[in-house]
Amino acid sequence: MPGTTEQIALLAEEGLRAISSAKTESDLLDAKGRYFGKKGAISEFLKGVASLALEERKRVGAAANEARTNLEAAFARRLEEIREKERRAREGFDRVDVTLPGRAPAIGHRHPISRTLTEIIAIFQRLGFSVRGGPEIEKDYYNFEALNIPKDHPARDMQDTFYIDWPGGDLVLRTHTSPIQIRTMETMSPPVRVIAPGAVYRCDSDVTHSPMFHQVEGFAVDRSITMADLKGLLTEFCRMMFGEGKPLRFRPSFFPFTEPSAEVDIRCVNCGGSGCRVCKDSGWLEILGCGMIDPAVYGFVGYDPEEYTGFAFGMGVERIAMLRHGISDIRLFFENDLRFLSQF
Amino acid sequence: MKVPCSWLREFVDTRLSPREIQDALTMAGVEVSSCRYLGEGMEDVVVARILDMGPHPSAEKLSLCRVTDGRGEYRIVCGARNMAAGDVVALARVGAKLPNGVQIGKAKIRGQVSEGMLCSEQELGMAEESPGILILPPETEVGTPLAPAIGMADWLLTVEITPNRGDCLSVQGVAREVAAITGEKVVLPEAAIAGTGLPIGEIASVMVTDTDLCPRYSARVITDVTIAPSPLPIQRRLALCGVRPINNIVDLTNYLLLELGQPMHAFDLDRLALHRIDVRKSGIARRFTTLDGTAREILPGMLLIWDGEGPVAVAGVMGGENTEVLPTTRRVLFESAHFSPASIRVTGRRLGLSTESSYRFERGVDPSGTMYAVDRAIHLLAGWSGFTIATGSFDIGGDREYRRVVPFRPARAERVIGRKYSDRECAEVLARLGFSVAEGAEGKWKVTVPAHRFDIEREIDLVEELARLSGYDTIPTTYPESGAPEFSPDDRFVAEVERASEFLRMGGFSQAINFSFVSGKEWEKHASLLGFQPSDAIMLANPISEDTTMMRPHLLMGLLHNVEGGIRRFQDDLWIFEAGKAFGKSLVEGHFEEPRLAFVMYGRRMAGNWSGGSAPVDFYDAKGVAESILLLLGCEPFHFMPAVSRPFLDPGKSSEIGKDGAVIGWVGAVRRELLSALEIPGAAYYGEIRIQAALSFPRTPQFRAIPRYPPATRDFACIFPVSVPVGDVLAMVRELTPEIRDTEVFDVFTGEKIGAGRKSVAFRVRIQAEDRTLTDADVHSIHTKIVNLLENRFGGKIRTS
Ligand SMILES: [Zn+2]
């Protein structure tokens, strides 16, 4: 019987042969199991030498450890060789082209009006306003009367109105989202801070007018709201919407339901103020109308005008989208041509 | 409204340049949308005389002119025919650039050299079109620059007046604004006259019956007048303001209207029956011909001017043909009045007639200025021609006080505006406006407002005047104190629609926004296919076009038209969605409007993908989209059931979506007949969800213990009659025992192999207990229950192979 260390050397040699002849990863794992795994030949052999003298056991143990270390190293080398070979074999035919499109639905496009509207709403929500909706088919009372636009008043000429064919004739397609002011104030006591987005309608159609378009109306009523607050709020809004460094100007104007009233102009986004076709050479672009809510309006909703003050503002979403995206014909928004929509 | 600067300066000798006037007025709320130098481009055009002219040798429509500008002579080829030798004309010499952009060069026209051009009004930018070249008055000095010679060395302002500022609808009104801004003085133009003729009471009479609608009526009479053209400078001013010159009397009334904003009418006194004027409402409906030659339907209650026999004018709107000034007129009654704005507006609207006069009366004409206007008119006319003024005047309502006293508190201005206004500043600004201020105790003032400021009635009106004239730019920028946060369900609605829209975008849909109004004609044509009752539709009373007559009852047609448009543009895959309202009549409210989310799918399942995405979309794609949206909206539980009342969807390939007994949406293949009508080839799938009905209050998920014991799975392949709804089968399987956790269909097919009228369905069931590992016997027992259910309840046959 050969010496115990020699036997280990023999087992190690067999193991190395098995490793070097392994063709696949599983051959290799198989060889490991047979020779130097937990239940492999070397472990089994060591179990058989438990009866030897201590000195001898130490020697055998050292030889076994050395053999294992060698085998592990050979295993690792061979594993790397096999994997490398497999990789190389695969590359010939099983390789992805990273430039081909992935498998997913092509992403669609949001309508630019919807995008702009969402942005405007988000800004005012951050500034503490909450959203209120209202009907598009509206009573004359809410669309006009309660907003201080009586029948037979020239202010009605400011908005060409669509009337609904209806007995009594007092239904209109709302010409602005301002009726929501009245509807809100009728049901709520101050403080109120509301924005009212939505579709509105006017009998008008050309390059800059569409019979249907979108508006965002905003208003706030409380005990100490001033026109200075209105300036502050809208300045902040314009900064968030159009970016820094775009001066604003507040210009006196007229709306029946606000007094004092103002139009807000922003420095022309196209020419920067030097004058161009977009701003009709004025260097300014009108972007919204606003003012302090007229005391007459409070009369319709039962607020005390001595106790409360408030402001209101309104802007056309199409107008803002046209300025931001450089669109010159409003009708494009409603043609829903994918060649247009896909640009947004 | 157009205002020539030279005219404006007659009223206020302002230090401001035209551009400065534009800015100052605009920033005070009187928007000047354009400020244009009229002589622009005329710098190189001079006054010249035609020395002689003859035919062009080789072009019979052209002539050859020899002209002089006083220094040199020029040969000009001209295409116009309205000139003759000796005429004074406008000559653009070589090198000139005209207002219409034309550059004059030395040219050879049909072999003849032309050293310039004789200009027409159109070429000079003075008119839209002109019949021939401009012929100047013979006395015009030859050789001088053209612009000053024809009054065009002037600036023209275009002023946009808001409806509240009727007082600014005149040169005088705009001048008052300039003065209020700068603190300069407004000049009241000369109006001195002397009546030397017969006493007016002997040749005419005036009365006002309806004084509530006509608080003031002023009139004078002139005699021995000759109707003739008015002076050229007057004609030019009228033309600049867009008014066609007619004769001295008519031009005079128009000139006064533009200058003072005071509408005025001139009657031929000898055509007034009994030389009498009465102002009163019409008692009956009648026909009346206005001076534009149109017969108008006068309704009872409309205010008319009458003579001794019948109506002679529609008060404040338009005069009658029967009494207008004729070339033969010798005696004229000039009147200027004040009429109730609302009455004029109603009359004008009913007659479909808006005139310069009615436009001003609607917005308020100064009742204190009528007599002055008549005097001013006659004073002006005296400079043009000779006549006699009857002694005295009629002035009904002339002794009334038209000024108003309005209370004002400087502290209130501060409260509204958010800026301190000192008493001194308030008083100074109000004084600039011509308001007189009486400062009272405790900061309560009384401000007297002149009659022309119709818009100033309340304290807030004075606050506005103060704020705008001290400049909005002096108002500080502050931020509103935040009030209590407010919860609005609409915040959530907007957020949920936004989420669903983003989901659809990520899923390959593009968003459309279609008009809410549709073509009633088209809907009626396809009424039965669209499931639409014309009597339920909401119609517009005044649609803007044939395509927009009716509020849409649902969103399908808009999206189908979008698909149709896409196909016309050679697009193959059209996945489009829209969030918008549907409208209709309802029993309770009379009418309803309801937010909907709709989508259409046309083309391939995974457009343009190289890897197996080219299969056409089918019902299950559309259903999947609908399901996902509903899950996103937190709509569970909901269920799909065969569609019964959606005729626009194919009954064999569509479904309604139910929740709590209500239909909350529908999805399916669009009816072939509809697609054919729109020339859409192939199939299109459509889904529409009633957003409010689908939005439930979000449930807060409740934790359930994660199963600790291993699951078992069993596959079943079963042949059913084709009518068996697989969804129902699986629902009942899941209800058999609590250990059945879920079911998943992994194969469905029909075909010859299994025979007609039958379908094969394969599904996997996952079985798992919460409290123990299931034994083989447990699983077997559940398996048996399932098989029994499939066979006995649904007539299924388990496939063995
Ligand atoms: Zn510009």
Image: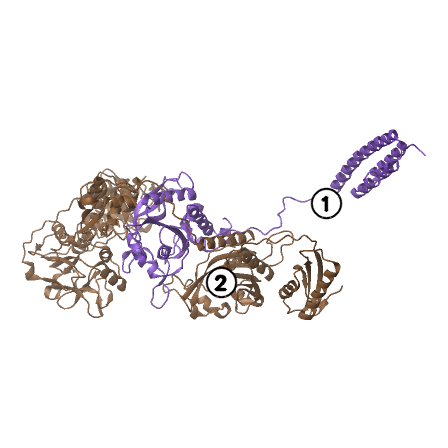
Chain colours: A purple, B brown
Spot occupied by residue A125 in the image (x, y as percentages of width and height): 43, 48
**Camera-nearest residue between B273 and B402:** B402
| Chain under numbered label 1 | A
Task: Decide: is B488 above or below B207.
Answer: above
Quarter that holds the C terminus of chain B: bottom right
At horizontal 79% and vertical 43% (from top left) the residue drawn is A26
Q: Is residue B581 left or right of residue B16?
A: right
Q: Is residue A13 left or right of residue B574?
A: right
Q: Is residue B49 left or right of residue A87?
A: left
Kind of residue sitting beneath label 2: Met
Give the residue number, with chain letter if any, for mark 2.
B557
Question: What is the distance, in whole Å, between disc 2 and disc 1 at their CAs?
Answer: 50 Å
**Camera-nearest residue between A33 and B609:** A33
Task: Decide: is B202 above or below A228.
Answer: below
- The answer to whether mark 2 is within 8 Å of ligand 1 is no
Spot occupied by residue B358 in the image (x, y as percentages of width and height): 23, 58
**Quadrant of picture, ligand 1:** top left
Q: Secondary structure at mark 2?
A: helix
Q: Is residue B618 visible?
A: no
Q: Write down the quadrant of residue B643 in the picture.
A: bottom right
Q: Is residue A228 visible?
A: yes
Kind of residue sitting beneath label 1: Phe
Spot occupied by residue B56 in the image (x, y as percentages of width and height): 30, 48
Give the residue number, with chain letter if any, for mark 1.
A93
Label annotation for residue A181: none
**Camera-nearest residue between B293 and B5:** B5
